[in-house]
Amino acid sequence: MDIRLAVLSRGPRLYSTRRLVEEAKKRGIDVFVADPMKFSLYVADGSIDIQYMGKPFLADAVIPRIGHSITKHGVALLRHLEQLGIWTANTGQGIIQSRDKLHASQILARNKIPVPRTTYVRDIIDVESAIDFVGGFPVVIKVTQGTQGQGVFLRHTLHEACSLVQGLLLTGKSVLVQEYIAESHGKDIRALVVGDRVVASMRRRARGREFRSNYHLNGTVEKVDLPPEFEEQACRAARVLGLHVAGVDLLEAEHGPLVLEVNSSPGLEGIEKASGANVAGEIVDFVASQTAFSEVDLDQLLRTVPGSGVLSLQLRNHPNLVGQKISQIFNKGSDIPVFALSRDNKLIWNPTDDLLLRYDDVIVCYGDLNELRASIKNAIIGVSKTNFEINEKEESNA
């Protein structure tokens, strides 16, 4: 294949890096490993440039294997590559969103992807109410930034929980109190998502009294046939976090799958051995098929025109508009600038102007931002006025 592929990794001898290089070479791809810490990024008036070890960086696509310790620098590098039009298997934004456990949970929950009940704690006095919210003891206490099971604890009493939270807060950590799923104690499912499908999956089990099932904590792994609902949630979780390649950790709760975490640089050793799947080959094939198509930040593109951009309208924040037609929101005589409507986890492209709006709908539109906001504001005022007049008339008739 006539592409030049760079695997961004500080460990060329690591299993995952070696496997990606091996599979790329099998396919005739010109591949090399590049240390993310050896790049120089240049920004000048009207242009940007990049060098690797003092020489021009020439690549059509990159597969980032960015470790937690260099997240900030790695994301800056990926964003620079994206601005240069170099295709990246995972974007900087996707990595940032997935590595902050609170932010990831917020995005997943907002998109109706089931997650364990979680509370963000900033003061020791909030611990007891947080525990009540997540369903009582035992509870999982974790830091928002962590990897391979580090910074994750199980606590059974209020004294233990308060002592741990206080210690974490004093060291500057951001703390989450999370629901404990008893039926999934010591085990979870890792689904490896590439593109829009799960290419491999495994069940991980903890050893002894350990409740964390991570492979790096000496947990065992086994092949598992993933039920369709688990596969669907894994793919949706990766998609809404902006990841093309992701390891999605799922808990087997009584009422169905819960998405626990999403890893943007999943290890390949455990899952390849457990599943027998050629995960590295799947990733390389996907990259090769996508390299010619760089993704565009539409909002950023439209903002190159002063005053223009993308605007989303969440109907739950404007209940007066529920039941109205799309055409009633925007000024009469103007082109309706709606190009998508999100409903029931699906997108309706170019919805008709007579479509009735529902409570959970999200309208996505583009154009002059001032005109869009003014039009929506007028619609809200107009609907409120109409409803007031109707109520007033009904009261007078009574």
Image (cartoon, grey):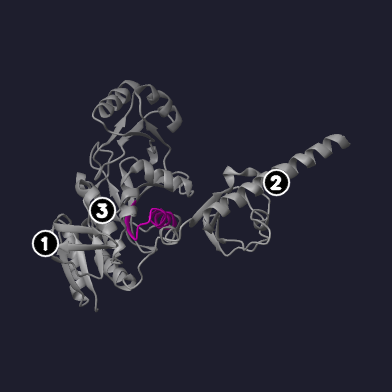
Residue 174 lies, with reference to residue 158, above or below; the image says below
Identify the residue under disc 1: 53
Which mark is on residue 383? 2
Q: Position of residue 72 (x, y in %)?
A: 24, 48
Instruction: Give amino acid for label 3.
Output: Ala
Residue 89 visible in the snapshot: no
Mark 3 in CB contact with mark 2 (< 8 angstroms):
no
Residue at left 39%, top 25%? Answer: 126
Front one among 2 and 282: 2
Q: CA distance from mark 3 to mark 1?
A: 17 Å
Q: Which segment is the magenta one? A: 230-248
Find numbered disc 2 in the image and state the secondary structure of the residue it sits on: helix
User: With 393 as the anchor, is 127 left or right in this view?
Assistant: left
Q: Secondary structure at mark 1?
A: loop
- x, y percentage for residue 125? 38, 21
In the rendering, at what x and y percent does residue 393 appear?
83, 39
The label number, if any, that marks residue 76 in the structure image: 3
Which circle's residue, 3 or 1, is located before the other in the chain?
1
Residue 15 appearing in the image: yes
